[in-house]
Amino acid sequence: MGFTIQQKTYEVVPTGDYPAEIDQIDLEQGQFGEQLKFTFRLLNREDGKTMWGWASASFTPKSKLYAWTRAAMGGQMIPPSYNLNTDHLIGKRVLLTVVISRKDDGAEYNKIQDVRPYLNGNAQPVAAATAPIYLDGNSF
C-alpha cells in the first residue's frame, strides 16, 4: 500500500534588507566543529517565513557570533567580562542583509550576508559606544 509524501518548496526572497527577530538558537555539530544555528523570523510578513544562519561557537571580538550578538544588543559594546548566554538573544530584533546565491546545480537559495542592529526600524552602524548593555534591568 502506497503513502503520500508532501513536497517541500522553498521561497527565495529578493536580495535586500529584512527586519527579523531571533526565534531560536541551537548548538549543532558541523563540518568544522560546533556551530550555532540561528533561526530568524522575518518581520512584516504574514507567512512567518524564517531563515537560518550559522556561526561558529567561538565568541571572540573577531568572530561572526560576536558581531551578531553585538547587532542583537543594538550595536553596543560588549564588555570583556561578558560570557554569552544565548537566551539573552532570543526575541531580539536585527536587520538581515540577504543575498541570493546559486548552488553548483543552478538552484538558488538565500544567504545571510550581514546581521546589523535594528533600531527604530532602521539599520544602524555599529557605533564605538561605551554605554553598558542592559539585560533584564541589569547592566554588565
Image (spheres, rainbow, N blue to C red):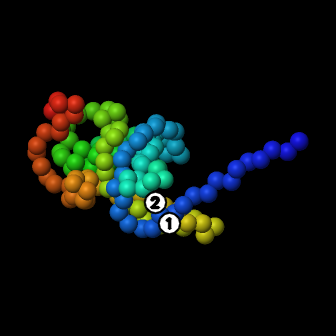
Residue 137 horizontal/vertical position (percent): 17, 31
Residue drawn at point x = 55 percent, y = 66 percent: 108
Hey, which quadrant is residue 80 in on the image? top left
Residue 17 horizontal/vertical position (percent): 35, 63
Give the mark nearest the N terminus, 1 or 2: 1
Q: Residues within 10 Å of mark 1 (few under 14, many from 20)?
A: some
Q: Residues within 10 Å of mark 2 (few under 14, many from 20)?
A: some
The quadrant in which the C terminus is found is top left
Q: Amino acid at mark 1?
A: Ser
Residue sitting nearer the eye, 98 or 27: 98
Q: Amino acid at mark 2?
A: Lys
Question: Which residue is identified by label 2?
Answer: 111
The quadrant in which the N terminus is found is top right
Residue drawn at point x = 22 percent, y = 34 percent: 135
Dot 2 falls on a residue whose secondary structure is strand
Residue found at the far right of this picture? 1
Dot 1 falls on a residue whose secondary structure is strand
In the visual, does 24 lie left or right of 108? Answer: left
Total residue callouts: 2
Query: Mark 1 touching mark 2, by CB under 8 A?
Result: yes
Question: Which residue is identified by label 1?
Answer: 101
Residue 29 horizontal/vertical position (percent): 52, 39
Q: Which mark is residue 45?
A: none
Tell me how far mark 1 sits from mark 2, CA to CA: 6 Å
In the visual, does 3 lie left or right of 56? Answer: right
* Residue 51 seen in render: no
Residue drawn at point x = 57 percent, y = 58 percent: 10
